[in-house]
């Protein structure tokens, strides 16, 4: 059986800002993160999410005494996909239902990634 592997990043820049890439296979609804492996001759259809979403839920993680707290969020996008990621904010976190933009973010090792910000 043939197995295809997705190698593209799960986010990209477009003229209107940054978007996340969801995928759907065989008529199933899109999902994020995108499907990595596709079996047989099926093709994964890509869906761009964003650049704006609506805050569904969040939490603030307090990793320890000498470390800075950080936020994690679940954000809703059209077409009915919820994505998880880092939430950037100064001071007070945004209210549930706020609109958030997808922004570039670098992981601690410098790897490019995405985050959500009001």
Image (cartoon, rainbow, N blue to C red):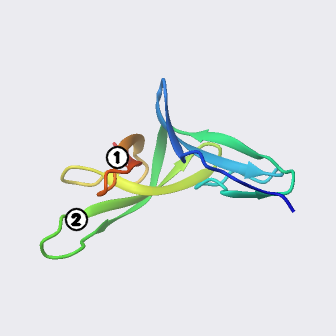
Which residue is at 41% across, 40% downward?
A: 101
Task: Mark 2 vs mark 1: give the one in front.
Answer: 1
Checking the image for residue 60, the label placed there is: none
Checking the image for residue 69, the label placed there is: 2
Q: Quadrant of the C terminus?
A: top left
x, y percentage for residue 106? 33, 49
Could you classify mark 2 by the number of other residues whose Cα lies within 10 Å: few (under 14), some (14-19), or many (20 or more)?
few
Residue found at the very far bottom of the displayed protein: 64
Judge by depth and name the residue closer to the eye, 1 or 105. 1
Asked whether, in this view, residue 64 is left or right of residue 115, the answer is left
x, y percentage for residue 26? 83, 52
Asked whether, in this view, residue 25 is left or right of residue 52, the answer is right
Which residue is at 65% across, 41% downward?
A: 47
Residue found at the very far left of the displayed protein: 66
* Image position of 44 with respect to 37: above or below: above
Judge by depth and name the residue closer to the eye, 107 or 82. 107
Pick whichever of labels 2 and 1 is earlier in the sequence.
Answer: 2
**For numbered disc 2, what is the local secondary structure?**
loop
**For numbered disc 1, what is the local secondary structure?**
strand
Residue found at the very far top of the displayed protein: 15
Which residue is at 78% across, 52% downward?
A: 25
Which residue is at 64% across, 49% downward?
A: 80
Residue found at the very far front of the displayed protein: 2
Checking the image for residue 105, the label placed there is: 1
Judge by depth and name the residue closer to the eye, 92 or 51. 51
Q: Marks 2/1: CA distance?
A: 16 Å
Q: How many marks?
A: 2
Could you classify mark 1 by the number of other residues whose Cα lies within 10 Å: few (under 14), some (14-19), or many (20 or more)?
some
x, y percentage for residue 117? 34, 45
Q: Are marks 2 and 1 in contact (CB under 8 Å)?
A: no
Q: Quadrant of the N terminus?
A: bottom right
Asked whether, in this view, residue 40 is left or right of residue 104, the answer is right
């Amino acid at each position: 059986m043939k197995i295809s592997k997705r190698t593209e990043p799960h986010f990209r820049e477009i003229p209107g800002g940054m978007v996340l890439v969801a995928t759907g296979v065989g008529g199933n609804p899109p999902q994020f993160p995108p499907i990595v492996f596709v079996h047989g001759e099926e093709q994964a259809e890509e869906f761009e999410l964003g650049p704006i979403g609506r805050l569904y839920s969040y939490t603030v993680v307090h990793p320890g005494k000498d470390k800075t707290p950080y936020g994690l969020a679940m954000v809703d996008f059209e077409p009915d996909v919820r994505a998880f990621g880092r939430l950037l904010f100064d001071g007070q976190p945004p209210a549930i239902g706020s609109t958030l933009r997808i922004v570039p973010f670098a992981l601690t090792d410098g790897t490019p990634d995405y985050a959500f910000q009001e």
